[in-house]
Image (cartoon, rainbow, N blue to C red):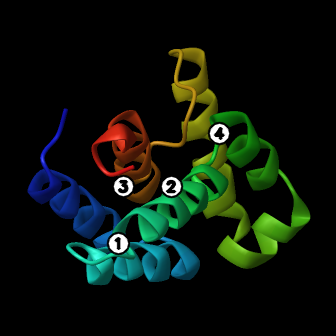
Amino acid sequence: METREVMIEKVKNMMAAPSCYAGLKTAGQSWMDAVGTADEKAAAKKLIDEIEADVLKVEDVLAFMQTDVAKAKFGAETAEKFAKHMAEIKAAGATYCDCPACTAGVDILNHKDSIL
């Protein structure tokens, strides 16, 4: 079981990732603000719910990167690179996206009992 201090560092790392979604950053900050208060457990539940909603599966990222929307948003070359990378890690057995935010999110989920 991870200590609260270790979990705070994990959440900070997740929030600092360039790929971290704004709503996830908000949930992370809300939990950190609530640590040590009567609202801590409720904020932890909201954080875990947000992580579960935001951590992406490899197949979902791969499918998205092959769309016209992804090509328009990131550029065709970048979307193709993302898609190729996702296909490679999927072939290697990865379940989740390996961007810094998703990686940190999965790590937090694997230790969520420490904060719930």
- Specify the amino acid type for callout 3: Pro
Q: CA distance from mark 4 to mark 2?
A: 16 Å
How crowded is the residue under tag 1: few (<14 C-alpha within 10 Å), some, or many (20+)? many
Res 60 → quadrant: top right
Q: CA distance from mark 1 to mark 3?
A: 9 Å
- First in residue order: circle 1 vs circle 4: 1
| Residue ID for mark 2 | 48
- Specify the amino acid type for callout 4: Lys
| Residue ID for mark 3 | 100
Q: CA distance from mark 3 to mark 2?
A: 17 Å
How crowded is the residue under tag 3: few (<14 C-alpha within 10 Å), some, or many (20+)? some
Q: Marks 3 and 2: CB-CB under 8 Å? A: no
- Residue at image point 36% right, 39% down: 113
Q: In the figure, is residue 12 to the left or right of 64? A: left
Q: CA distance from mark 3 to mark 4?
A: 14 Å
Q: In the figure, is residue 70 to the left or right of 16? A: right
Q: Nearer the viewer, mark 1 or mark 3?
A: 1
Q: In the figure, is residue 101 to the left or right of 67? A: left
| Residue ID for mark 4 | 57
